Image: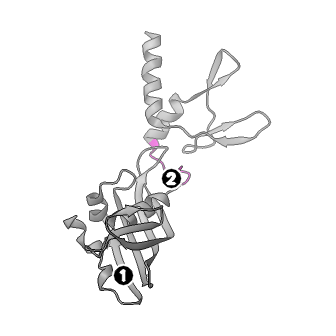
Amino acid sequence: MGKFSAYNIPLKDLSKGSRNYEFKLDNEYFKNIEGAEVQKGNVLAKVEVKRTSTAFELTFDITGIVQIPCDRCLDNMDQEIDTQNQLIVKFGSEYAEESDTIIVVPEEEGEINLAWFLYEFIALNIPIRHVHPAGKCTKSMVSKLKKHLTREKGEDDEEPIEFMDEEDLVIEEEGGVEEEQATDPRWDSLKKLIEEDNNN
């Protein structure tokens, strides 16, 4: 883990009390970590390490912006990150994760590397559904979605989805209730190929 050595915390060398650390997570960090959710970003992680008689309490305050693909048009979008997390670290004979928040590290090594923990905290702060604000999606992709998305009307008939504006994918239910129609563009492309094959 040489490229992540800057994220080591030498627990064994810490005296009782608290010590503060700061880590700047830039594009190079996200590239090196090779996580699936985030490839770019500018995030500041502040970590307070408090040594007690039996363990180390790590408190994380992570804020910044990461770039992730929009669920609607697949172009990158900015996602704000603002999360607070905690870890309890104890010494033991070998590395172990006793729970999501309790970590055992080998006493011989006497340190913990935070690189992957920081990434996980960021990834968990990203909403399940993430899309551009209205009007910010790629126009060409939205145009293709408008062309190919359909919904059932009755048992046999299909008609295109009604859109409220150029960028928002909205379906209007009976009684005038509007709902967002979330779709994965990759499935829509597959659906188009199937439809073309059926028409030939």
Vertical placement of residue 33 versus 138, above or below: below
Residue located at (48% from left, 66% from top):
101
- Location of residue 162 in the rendering, given as x and y in whole percent from the top left corner: 63, 34
Which residue is under mark 1? 21
- Of residues 22 and 138, the one drawn nearer to the viewer in this rendering: 22
Amino acid at circle 2: His
Residue extending farthest front: 93
Residue extending farthest right: 175
The Cα–Cα distance between marks 2 and 1, rounded to whole angstroms, is: 33 Å
The stretch in magenta equals: 128-139
Residue located at (31% from left, 65% from top):
94
- Location of residue 196 in the rendering, given as x and y in whole percent from the top left corner: 44, 17
Which residue is under mark 2? 132
Which quarter of the image is occupied by the N terminus? bottom left
Q: Earlier in the sequence, mark 2 or mark 1?
A: 1
Q: Please state if 46 lies on the left or on the right of 170 as rendered.
A: left
Residue extending farthest top: 200
Q: Secondary structure at mark 2?
A: loop
- Location of residue 182 in the rendering, given as x and y in whole percent from the top left corner: 57, 40
- Of residues 60 and 45, the one drawn nearer to the viewer in this rendering: 60
Q: Please state if 167 lies on the left or on the right of 1 as rendered.
A: right
Q: Is residue 39 magenta?
A: no
Residue located at (41% from left, 73% from top):
89
How many residues crowd mark 2 within 10 Å: few (<14), some (14–19), many (20+)? many
Amino acid at circle 1: Tyr
Which colour scheme appears in the figure? one colour
Q: Quadrant of residue 175?
A: top right
- Of residues 162 and 101, the one drawn nearer to the viewer in this rendering: 101
Vertical placement of residue 147 versus 197, above or below: below
